[in-house]
Amino acid sequence: MNYTTYKVVHKIYHQAVVKNFPFVVLYSIDEKDIIITAIFNTSRKPKKKLR
């Protein structure tokens, strides 16, 4: 998985959609680390993920 190819949704946060499940993973990339900020269920209020 190439973590840099996913969509940037807000400044430093990337969004990866999980196939076969209604989930989105929001993460940021540090120098050596990937920091997962949230795992969000999109079947519930999808606009709430960046709140």
Image: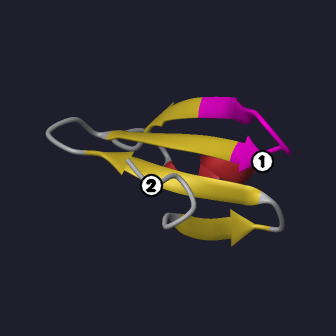
17 vs 40, left or right, is: left
3 vs 31, left or right, is: left
Task: Report the residue at 72% width, 51% height from top.
Answer: 50
Q: Nearer the viewer, residue 38 or 33?
A: 33
| Camera-side mark, 1 or 2 | 2
Task: Report the residue at 49% width, 67% height from top.
Answer: 5
Q: Position of residue 42 (x, y in %)?
A: 40, 44
- Residue that label 2 marks: 2
Task: Report the residue at 74% width, 46% height from top.
Answer: 28
Which mark sits nearer the N-terminus, 1 or 2? 2
Asked where in the image residue 8 lies, by quadrant, the reply is bottom right
Q: Nearer the viewer, residue 36 or 22?
A: 36
Numbered range of the magenta stretch? 28-38
For marks 1 and 2, give the CA distance.
26 Å
Task: Report the residue at 83% width, 67% height from top.
Answer: 11
Main secondary structure type of the part rendered in magenta: strand
Q: Which mark is residue 51?
A: 1
Q: Which mark is residue 41?
A: none
4 vs 46, left or right, is: right
Query: Circle 1 — which element?
Result: loop
In the rendered image, residue 31 lying in the magenta stretch gets the answer: yes
Q: Nearer the viewer, residue 3 or 11?
A: 3
Q: Nearer the viewer, residue 38 or 34?
A: 34
Identity of the amino acid at label 1?
A: Arg
7 vs 33, left or right, is: left
